[in-house]
């Protein structure tokens, strides 16, 4: 099993660098579900002592990326349908609140920025570039609004949930363009509520958009699990 290289960001401790590298490997599927992370093997691979590896694996376990499997080491978890859908439910509440705050606090210029992102996403979709459209929509959905609202703790919570959901999101997008088109339409409605400064409507639309995603994802997971 090849491990991703350690980050060269000097501000990070060695433990944090190991943690980020291993999590990146899990998200990219370089480290696959049910793979084992053995402290001694990881330490040898990176040419470091066992202590930062042990601490990094404890951090991964706390976030739900691995589970302790006794003597064999830490096993990369397999995301269950129940776990993912529970996370999406929490995400719906948090992002609904973010949309409410955005309608109340974004400047006109910031709302114009959000509209530009969605315009580009829709143009990419019309051009058949579904991947770019999806990435731009995610920028609006998970990056732009949370960042502009300015609550860093809230943004960190949303990002942590999003990382787990990303592990199974390809199941939904692989179903074709239809979910992407529906998502784009819903994002446009949310943007219109922001432009109207209708906080209650923005919250409701974002909440239902995320719940819609959960229902679509549930269908995809059921197909996968047979």
Image (tube, rainbow, N blue to C red):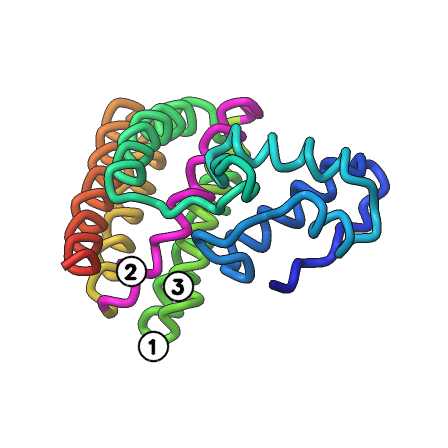
Q: Up-down: is 198 above or below 218?
A: above
Mark 1 Cα shell of 10 Å, populated few (<14), some (14-19), many (≥20): few
What type of secondary structure mainly makes up the magenta span?
Answer: helix
Instruction: Specify whether residue 202 is in view.
Output: no
Dot label at residue 128: 1
**Depth check: 171 or 120 in front?**
171
Magenta span has 56? Answer: no
Expressed as whole percent of the image width and height from the top left, the position of residue 183 reads 26, 53
**Depth check: 206 or 9 in front?**
9
The image quadrant of residue 14 is top right
- Please name the residue shown 47% across and 36% down the image: 67
Disc 3 versus disc 2: nearer the observer:
2
Magenta span has 165? Answer: yes
Dot label at residue 171: 2
Magenta part of the chain: 150-175
Q: Which residue is mark 3?
A: 133
Q: CA distance from mark 1 to mark 3?
A: 9 Å
């Amino acid at each position: 099993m090849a491990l991703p290289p350690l980050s060269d960001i000097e501000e990070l401790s060695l433990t944090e660098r190991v943690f980020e590298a291993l999590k990146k490997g899990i998200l990219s599927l370089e480290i696959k579900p049910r793979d084992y992370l053995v402290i001694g093997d990881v330490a040898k691979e990176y040419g470091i002592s066992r202590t930062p590896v042990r601490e990094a694996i404890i951090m991964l376990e706390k976030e739900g990326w691995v589970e302790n499997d006794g003597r064999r080491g830490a096993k990369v978890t397999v995301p269950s349908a129940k776990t993912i859908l529970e996370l999406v439910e929490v995400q719906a509440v948090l992002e609904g609140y973010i949309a409410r705050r955005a309608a109340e606090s974004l400047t006109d210029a910031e709302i114009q920025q959000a509209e530009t992102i969605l315009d580009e996403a829709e143009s990419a979709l019309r051009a058949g570039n579904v991947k770019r459209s999806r990435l731009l929509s995610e920028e609006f959905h998970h990056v732009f609004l949370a960042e502009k609202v300015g609550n860093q703790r809230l943004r960190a919570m949303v990002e942590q949930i999003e990382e787990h959901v990303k592990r199974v999101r390809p199941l939904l997008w692989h179903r074709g363009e239809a979910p992407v088109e529906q998502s784009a339409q819903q994002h446009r409605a949310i943007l219109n509520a922001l432009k109207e400064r209708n906080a209650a409507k923005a919250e409701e639309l974002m909440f239902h958009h995320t719940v819609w995603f959960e229902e679509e994802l549930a269908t995809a997971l059921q197909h996968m699990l047979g």
